[in-house]
Each structure stands twice: as C-alpha cells, then as structure tokens.
Image (tube, rainbow, N blue to C red):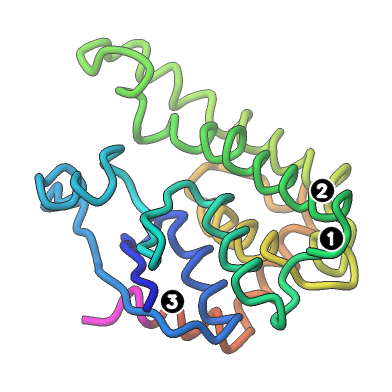
Amino acid sequence: MLKLYYAPRTCSLATHIALEDVGADYSTVRISFAANQQQSPDYLKINPKGRVPALVTDRGILTETPAMLAFVAQSFPAAQLAPLDDPFAFAEVQAFNSYLCSTLHIAHAHRMRGHRWVDAEDAAAIAAMQRKVPQSVTAGFEQVEHDMFKGPWVMGERYTICDPYLFTLAQWLEADGVDLARIPKVVDHRRRMSERPNVKKAIAQEFAP
C-alpha cells in the first residue's frame, strides 16, 4: 500500500488528488507544521529534506511533486492521467509540472519562507521579497494563462496530472495578491476542479479532525 505524508494547504494536495483519481489503495499521515513535525527525527528518516509531500512505495520513498505525480500516472496506466504512449506529449506534461515546481511555487514561497534565501534576521530583505510576491506570482500565472494552458484542461481535452497540480497552486492566488481578472482561464479551471468528487474527497480527508 502507498503511504502519503502530507500537510494541509501545501502542494501535497496534488498527489493526494491524483491518488484518488487512479483509485489507489493508499493511506495518509498528517504532518503538523505548527508542531514542526517536518523537522522531527522520525520524519527526517522518511524525507531528509524536511518537507512534504513524501510518498512511501514498495520500492522506496519518493519526494518532489512532479516525480510523485509521474509515478502515480505510470503506476496506474488504465486511469490515463498522462500520455504515456507519446514521449513528446509526456515531456510536455513534465515541462508544465516542472514549471509549477521550479518557478511558480518558488515565487509563492517568498511570501512566507524568505528565510530560505536570506538570513531570518534581515527584516528588510524578507519584506522586500514579500512585496515582490504579487508581481512575481501574477507573472507566473499569466504565463500559464496565455502560453501554457490549452483548455479545457491544462493539456487540452484530456485531464492529466497537470490539472491537480495547477489546482493546488491556484488555492493560494488570493493570499498571494494575484489579480484574478487577469487569469480567467486559471480561475475557471480552479472552479471546475473544485467540483470534481475526487478533489472534494481529498480536501475533506486533509482537513478531517
């Protein structure tokens, strides 16, 4: 059985949704950021990076959302969450998810995790990064809106592992100060994703008492 280590309101939701989409047999373990469990000795044995998500498989432990999503899609090919029979199309899926991971998520993280890039005591640098977030995150989502989103789903007519990942990052639009009027396709995608039963189920599980 697969085991997903997650924390609410983090990118772990993308893999959680994908596991529901494929009908996987899996369990979850909630990591409390408030209690700093991600830095506990027990969790660091699972993911030495001290972050979520982490996915325990029968072959070992995976981290990094793009890798985990690709693993889920490839492990459950009947669900057709990725164009596994088309190397170029699959590479496009990987390129999109890599952009979310390496660019959009990083821009978002500057709002609350500036200590990763400058000393925590440097209040001016932290504040400068926070002020930049609305601009940098908006620019990233506009790139998705105008140059990457094919519609009606990210990759076109076919729902893929790109969709739960984009939905997950779109949960933070308002908090990041993004002008929603500038990204109507992304906002509509978020609405449609939120109506999917598997999405509702994953979110409900993450926030269950």
Tell me if 169 is positioned left or right of 145 in this view.
left
Of labels 2 and 3, the one closer to you: 2
Residue 178 part of the magenta segment = no
Q: Kindly identify the residue that appears in the image at 88 percent across and 59 percent down.
A: 86
Secondary structure beneath dot 1 equals loop
Secondary structure beneath dot 3 equals helix
Tell me if 144 is positioned left or right of 69 in this view.
right
Of 120 and 124, which appears nearest the observer? Answer: 120
Q: Kindly identify the residue that appears in the image at 82 percent across and 48 percent down.
A: 92
Q: Tag 1: Cα neighbours inside 10 Å, few (<14), some, or many (≥20)? A: many
Q: Is residue 165 above or below residue 25?
A: above
Tell me if 5 is positioned left or right of 80 in this view.
left
Q: Amino acid at mark 3?
A: Ile
Classified by dominant secondary structure, the portion drawn in magenta counts as: loop
> Which stretch is magenta?
205-209
Labels 2 & 3 near each other (Cβ < 8 A): no
Of 105 and 49, which appears nearest the observer? Answer: 49
Looking at the rendered image, the quarter that the N terminus falls into is bottom left
- x and y, in percent, of residue 16 in the image: 47, 70
Q: Tag 2: Cα neighbours inside 10 Å, few (<14), some, or many (≥20)? A: some
Residue 208 part of the magenta segment = yes
Q: Kindly identify the residue that appears in the image at 62 percent across and 58 percent down.
A: 70
* Residue that badge 2 annotates: 92
Of labels 3 and 1, the one closer to you: 1
Labels 3 & 1 near each other (Cβ < 8 A): no
Labels 1 & 2 near each other (Cβ < 8 A): yes
> What number is the disc on residue 203?
3
Of labels 1 and 2, the one closer to you: 2
- x and y, in percent, of residue 46 in the image: 25, 51
* Residue that badge 1 annotates: 155
Q: Kindly identify the residue that appears in the image at 90 percent across and 72 percent down.
A: 157
